[in-house]
Image: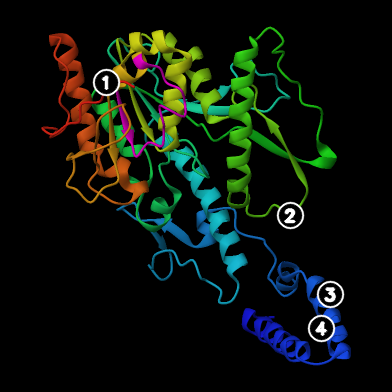
Amino acid sequence: MSVTFITSILLIIWINMAQLQQGGPDEKEKTTALKDFLSRIDLDELMKKDEPPLEFPDTLEEFEYAFNEKGQLRHTKTGEPFVFNYREDLHRWNQKSYEALGEIITKYVYELLEKECHLKKIFLPVDATDSEPKSFIFMSEDAMTNPDKLMVLIHGSGVVRAGQWARRLIINDDLDSGTQIPYIKRATEEGYGVIVLNPNENYIEVEKTKVQVQPSSDSSDEPAEKRERKDKIQKETKKRRDFYEKYRNPQKEKETVQLYIRDNGSPEEHAIYVWDHFISQSAAENVFFVAHSYGGLAFVELMIQREAEVKNKVTAVALTDSVHNVWHQEAGKAIREWMRENCCNWVSSSEPLDTSVESMLPDCPRVSAGTERHELTSWQSFASVFKFFGEAVEAKHSSVKPAPTRRSNRLRYEEF
C-alpha cells in the first residue's frame, strides 16, 4: 500500500467532511462519525501492513557495501555511493535500513581501532561483575606509562560511539572525516599515548521478560548537593537519549528496558569515571583533550568536578564546535580564566581556518574551523589542533602561552 494511495483516500474523506459540514444536522452527524473513524486510524500501523520485514544484513558484505582504498563507502556491484531512498515510498524501511547499516559501521570502526590503530579495549566499570552491564573504552599500550604526552578523544552526543565523529560523514563522505582514526594515527606517530572515550555507551537493553533487578550503587554517603547534580545530569541525559533512541536501535519492535552502566550512566559521568581510573593515574606530564560538540560540555563538567586535578594535569584542550556553556554549567571564575589560557574552540564558520570568531561567553577563544558544517569541524581543524598542542608544550617549557590562531582582534572578556 503506497503513501500516495493512502494520501488519496484520506484526501477524499476530508473533502467529503468539508461538504457535509455545510449541510444540516444529519450531515453534521455524519461528519462527527467520519471524524471518529479517522481518529481510530493509526497511519503508522497502516503503513506497516505492506511493509517488508525489518530484517537486515549483519555485515557490510551482506549489505553489498565496502570501503574502497580512499575510505569511501561504495556498493560492491555498482560502485555507487550509499543510497538512502533504496525503496520508493518506504521511508520508514529506508530509515531502518540506514540505521542497521550504521550499527554495522560502529562495529567496523571498533575493529579498525584494534587492528589498524593497535588500541586495546578496556571494559568499564573496572570492577564489574560478570552479570552487570558494561561499557568500554580504547587505549594505546602506552596510555598509562608514556611519561611525556597523552591525548584523550571525546565525541559528541547521539548515535556515535568510540572512534567516531559523525556516522553521516562515514557513510556519505569517508572514514578520515567521520572517524577519529587520523587523530589516533598522527598522535601515535608524534609520541602520544591515546585514550578514546565512549560517552554514549551508557546502558544495555534487554527484553522486559528477561530483565533482572539491576544492582544500584549505594549513594547514601554522597553529599546532598552532589546527589542533586547527579540526578539532574541523569534526567537531562535520559531526555536526550530518548530522542536519539529511535535512531539507535533500528529493529526495536519488542518492549525493552534500559539497564544503566554503573558510574557511566551519562557522558558526564563517563568522563569523570575515566579521569578517576585512568587519565589521572597516567604517567604523562602533558595531557591533551580533543572534545567535539557535547564532548566539550562533558569536559567542562569534568573540570568543575575535578578542577585542581585537571589544572595540574592538562596542558591544552582543543574543542570543536563545543556546545558547553560556562553560565549554564556554573563554571567559576578560576575555571573560566584557565579555559581562556589553555583552551581553543574551533567553531563552524564561513571564515577561513583559524580566523578569530567573536563570542559573548567569557571562556576560551573561538576560531573558525574553516567549515560551516558542524560535523566536519574536527576534521577540518585537524592540522591546527596538533599545531596548537605543539605550541602549548613549547610554551609550558618557556613559560609563554601559545597563540594558536590569528587573534589580533581577540576579545577581552570582563568578569561579571
How far from the left and from the top, in percent, is residue 221? 68, 7
Under circle 2, the secondary element is loop
**Disc 2 residue type (three-letter):** Glu
Judge whether residue 364 is colored magenta. no
Circle 1 crowding by C-alpha within 10 Å: few under 14, some 14–19, many from 20: many
Sequence-wise first label, 1 or 4 = 4
**Disc 1 residue type (three-letter):** Asn
**The one of 276 and 400 positioned closer to us in this rendering:** 400
**Disc 3 residue type (three-letter):** Asp
Where is mark 2, residue-wise? 253
Between the C-alphas of marks 1 and 3, the distance is 63 Å
Q: Please tell me which residue is depicted at 67% across the width and 35% down the height of the picture.
A: 204
Sequence-wise first label, 4 or 2 = 4
Asked if the residue at tag 4 contacts the one at tag 3, i.e. Cβ–Cβ closer than 8 Å, the answer is: no
Question: Which corner quadrant of the image does residue 308 belong to?
Answer: top left
Prevailing secondary structure class for the magenta stretch in the rendered image: loop
Sequence-wise first label, 2 or 1 = 2
Circle 3 crowding by C-alpha within 10 Å: few under 14, some 14–19, many from 20: few
Where is mark 1, residue-wise? 342
Between the C-alphas of marks 2 and 1, the distance is 47 Å
Where is mark 3, residue-wise? 36
Q: Point out the stretch of residues depicted in magenta.
A: 316-333
